[in-house]
Image (cartoon, rainbow, N blue to C red):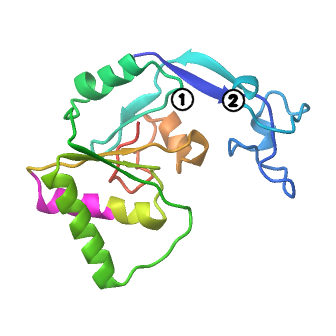
Amino acid sequence: MKVSVTFDTEYNPKHEADDSLCYCNRPRKLHPNINSVSPKWNCKSHTTTFKAKNQQGIFDNGAHYLRCDVLADAKGLKSMLFETWQVKPDPRLIISIIGGTKYFNLTDKLETKFMDALINMAINSDAWLLTNGFNVGIVQYVGQAIHKSKLTNVDKPIVAIGLPEYGCIKNLKQLKNPQKTSLQAASDGSCPTL
């Protein structure tokens, strides 16, 4: 399946104090147009959309991933989810858990309570879990809960979808060259990424 992919072409510094990274999290030198710096990043004027193939795959743990444009055709995404990947449609509940990028620790008791409650809620309500796909903060605990659920509830899989920004994906080179390396999910294999 060919999908539309957005590529940042205009460099725009992420931080005023350090201009080495663009707003898209790629280094300045990787942008075709590094001489024009606009005061404010804008998706329409700073990106180019193109059709691409091989922007999808499967991690070693069986989780699927897809890189697509933020304005991708909803019918195509629906077809990919339900027909190609055979994700169970019609969740009774969608739980969105978005966390920051800071590490923190929960007490063992609180961590266990959070994970058990999340697993029970997701399984008993046929829920989908939506996250930012990060392996830090509260989302890291979500990934650990899903992994724990895979071990203890084999017959009741949880649908988890990570939606990270492309520039924030860990081990991005592995996604670009899936034939050459063993893929690992950014969330230690616990969340499929669309």
Q: Earlier in the sequence, mark 2 or mark 1?
A: 2
Q: Quadrant of residue 89?
A: top left
Name the residue at 45% across, 18% down. Answer: 73
Please name whichever residue, 114 or 5, is drawn nearer the observer in this view of the structure: 114
| Residue 179 figure quarter | top left
**The residue stretch that appears in magenta:** 144-154
Element on which disc 2 rests: helix
* Outermost residue, front side: 92
In the rendered image, residue 125, in percent from the top left (x then y), is placed at 17, 50
Within the magenta stretch, is there residue 134? no
Left or right: 118 in relation to 172: left
* Residue highlighted by disc 1: 70
Residue at the (26%, 29%) spot, across then down: 85
Instruction: Give the residue displayed 56% in from the left and 42% down from the top.
Output: 165
Q: Quadrant of residue 22?
A: top right
Query: Which percent across, then down, holds residue 109?
Result: 28, 84
Q: Quadrant of the image for the C terminus?
A: top left
**Could you say which disc has been placed on residue 43 in the image?**
2
Image coords of residue 138 (percent x, y): 43, 65
The disc labelled 1 sits on which kind of residue? Val
SS assignment at label 1: loop
Residue 169 vertical placement versus 109 (above, below): above
Decide whether the magenta segment is chiefly helix, strand or loop: helix
Badge 2 vs badge 1, beta-carbon distance below 8 Å:
yes
Q: How far is disc 2 from disc 1 in space, using C-alphas?
A: 10 Å
Vertical arrangement, residue 70 with respect to residue 144, above or below = above
* Type of amino acid under label 2: Cys
